[in-house]
């Protein structure tokens, strides 16, 4: 019997982040205890998966009765984060999970303060889709 692979699917407007190692040492070389690092308001990490985005309703014809409006394909407002981005986010908004022995953070898009992306990645992705 073949072994089944598990995969973690991110839903909604959430982002799965592999947390960075953290700054456990100051610039002058002093080591910080875990309690000092945990008290920082922001954290960083690498984006490993993103959800489809915030679900939005389909535009409805106001002349139709509500029960006549047919269900269509789900539509989403996509998240800004992309796999491979370096994310800076509020630590308190993140939820830590463990999946197959690895620690990850699930972060809502609203908690992400900024993203660092290598220059030219957006243009390359747009050109390859043509």
Image (spheres, rainbow, N blue to C red):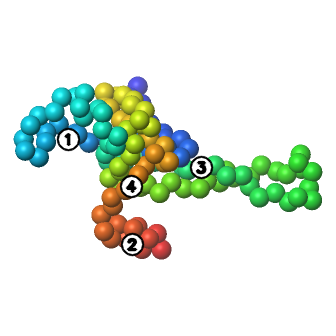
Of label 1 and label 2, which has the lower sequence position?
A: 1
Of label 4 and label 3, which has the lower sequence position?
A: 3
Label 3: how many residues lie within 10 Å, few (<14), some (14-19) or many (20+)? Answer: some
CA distance for labels 2 and 4: 19 Å
Q: Which image quarter: residue 41?
A: top left
Q: Pointers 2 and 3 in contact (CB under 8 A)?
A: no
**Residue 50: image x %, image y %?**
46, 48
Of label 2 and label 4, which has the lower sequence position?
A: 4
Which-is-in-front pick, marks 1 and 2? 1
Which-is-in-front pick, marks 4 and 3? 4
- Residue tagged by mark 1? 23
Count the marks.
Answer: 4
Q: Residue at x 18, y 28 (%)?
A: 33
- Residue tagged by mark 2? 123
- Residue tagged by mark 4? 114
Of label 1 and label 3, which has the lower sequence position?
A: 1
Q: Residue at x 32, y 52 (%)?
A: 86
**Residue 129: image x %, image y %?**
46, 69
- Above or below: residue 34 compared with residue 69: above
- Residue tagged by mark 3? 54
Of label 1 and label 4, which has the lower sequence position?
A: 1
Which-is-in-front pick, marks 2 and 3? 3
**Residue 18: image x %, image y %?**
32, 41
Which label belongs to residue 93? Answer: none
CA distance for labels 4 and 3: 18 Å
- Above or below: residue 127 compared with residue 11: below
CA distance for labels 1 and 4: 18 Å
Q: Secondary structure at mark 2?
A: helix
CA distance for labels 2 and 3: 24 Å
């Amino acid at each position: 019997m073949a072994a089944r692979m598990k995969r973690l699917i991110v839903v909604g407007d959430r982002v799965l982040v592999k947390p960075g190692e953290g700054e456990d040492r100051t610039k002058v070389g002093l080591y910080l205890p875990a309690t000092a690092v945990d008290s920082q308001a922001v954290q960083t990490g690498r984006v490993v998966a993103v959800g489809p985005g915030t679900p939005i309703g389909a535009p409805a014809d106001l002349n139709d009765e509500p029960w006549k409006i047919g269900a269509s394909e789900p539509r989403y407002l996509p998240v800004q984060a992309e796999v491979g981005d370096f994310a800076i986010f509020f630590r308190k908004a993140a939820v830590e999970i463990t999946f197959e022995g690895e620690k990850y953070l699930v972060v809502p898009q609203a908690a992400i303060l900024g993203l660092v992306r290598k220059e030219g990645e957006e243009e390359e992705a747009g050109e390859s889709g043509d």
